[in-house]
Image (cartoon, helix red, strand yellow):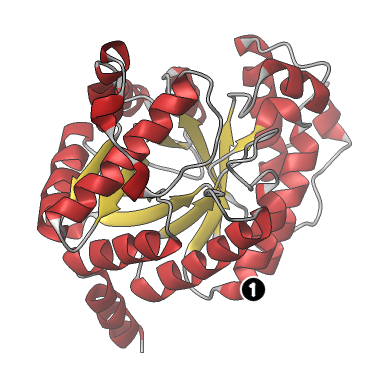
Amino acid sequence: MKTSSSLRLSVLDQSPVPQGRTPREALLHTLELARLSDRLGYTRFWVSEHHNTRTLAGSAPEVLLARLGAETSRIRLGSGGVMLPHYSALKVAESFRVLETLYPGRIDLGIGRAPGTDRVTAHALNPHNTFRDEDFAEQLMDLRAFLRDEVVEDTIHMKVKAAPFTDTRPELWLLSSSGQSGLFAAQLGAAFSFAHFINPHGGRAMMELYQQRFRPSPELATPQANVAIFVLCADTEAHAQRLADNLALQMLKLEIGNFTPIGPEAEVNLSRLPAELQERLPYHYQRMVFGTPAQVKQQLEELAASYQVDEVCAVTIAHRFEDRLRSYELLAEAFALPQQLAEAAATAA
């Protein structure tokens, strides 16, 4: 692992639709956030896939990424992630080879296996989805073969190749909040991202297992991994606490089946919650880091050290878009990302 001073920071944006906003505004905010992340020196900008929800607008990451490539110039762009069981491996490979052709050397293909929705919607997306480990593993093997232009005897890969044919290929990442995909990533020699913001337990053990069982591949000689976590950075500790309380409340609402959008921080009063719900709040605080820039920097460095990774992917959701922008600005300043970007540009010149 690299030293904490060289910790890389990336962004995972879910295109949230807060109370009083529209899906169009949410997607336009994603574009603005991508431009900001590009300027500030973040390593990657990933967008998520969710279906049948009014609170998140990103249902087709490959479409959104095509626009994001035109809005940015340097930052890597990717899916966090495409839910592979909904689709054919060939279609996913071709979509991301198109993106790689448009923006060579900048595309990450992040793959997930969770539905990203309820089971009824998952069935509507793919009536043949079995949710079995064996089927997902077979899809992954097919996807890798299509990305590599492999010729595999006695398979469809003898005759079918993923177009367009390019000199570079997307970087393959497997995403997980439970762990099984970490083992798949290790066997495939692919990169791995653990979603701590979804599940704060078990990730460190799975990351260690991924690193121990990693098999070198033509794409990766050594393990490459990051951890994704909710990050709320503010100018004052009190403001960060209000943002964290609101996000914890929103996660609690989702847990009990209340799918209303996140509302203003001023309306949050956690003391009014029933005792049994207040007892759940500490779990949701474990899914995030929050505070002033110095506090957040220390927490992220400790998180990265505990996971033994050199990259953290920040997920920031708040009612006001201005608070989200400010959080990413303060985070970049805390880690001196703009200065590092300027130094790298000067060296390249």
Determine the secondary structure under disc 1.
helix
Q: Is residue 255 above or below residue 343?
A: above
Residue found at x 79% / y 25%: 153
Q: Position of residue 108 (x, y in %)?
A: 55, 51
Left-right relation of 62 to 11: right
Q: Residue at x 55, y 35 (%)?
A: 260
Structural crowding at the residue carrying mark 1, measured as other residues with C-alpha within 10 Å and reported as few (<14), some (14–19) or many (≥20): few
Eyeballing the image, is 131 above or below 291? above
Work out which residue is located at the far right of the displayed protein and give it: 159
Which image quarter: residue 147? top right
The answer to whether residue 286 is left or right of residue 186 is left
Q: Is residue 294 visible?
A: yes
Give whichever of 162, 54 is nearer the camera: 54
**Location of mark 1 (residue):** 70
Q: Quadrant of the N terminus?
A: top left
Q: Is residue 161 left or right of residue 291?
A: right
The residue closer to the viewer here, 261 or 349, is 261
Q: Foreground residue, 69 or 152?
A: 69
Mark count: 1
Q: Amino acid at mark 1?
A: Ala
The image quadrant that residue 172 belongs to is: top right
Residue 278 occupies which quadrant of the picture? top left
Tell me where residue 311 appears, x and y as whole percent: 30, 48
**Residue 166 visible (yes or no):** no
Side of 168 relative to 89 (left or right) = left
Residue 335 location (% of width, % of height): 19, 63
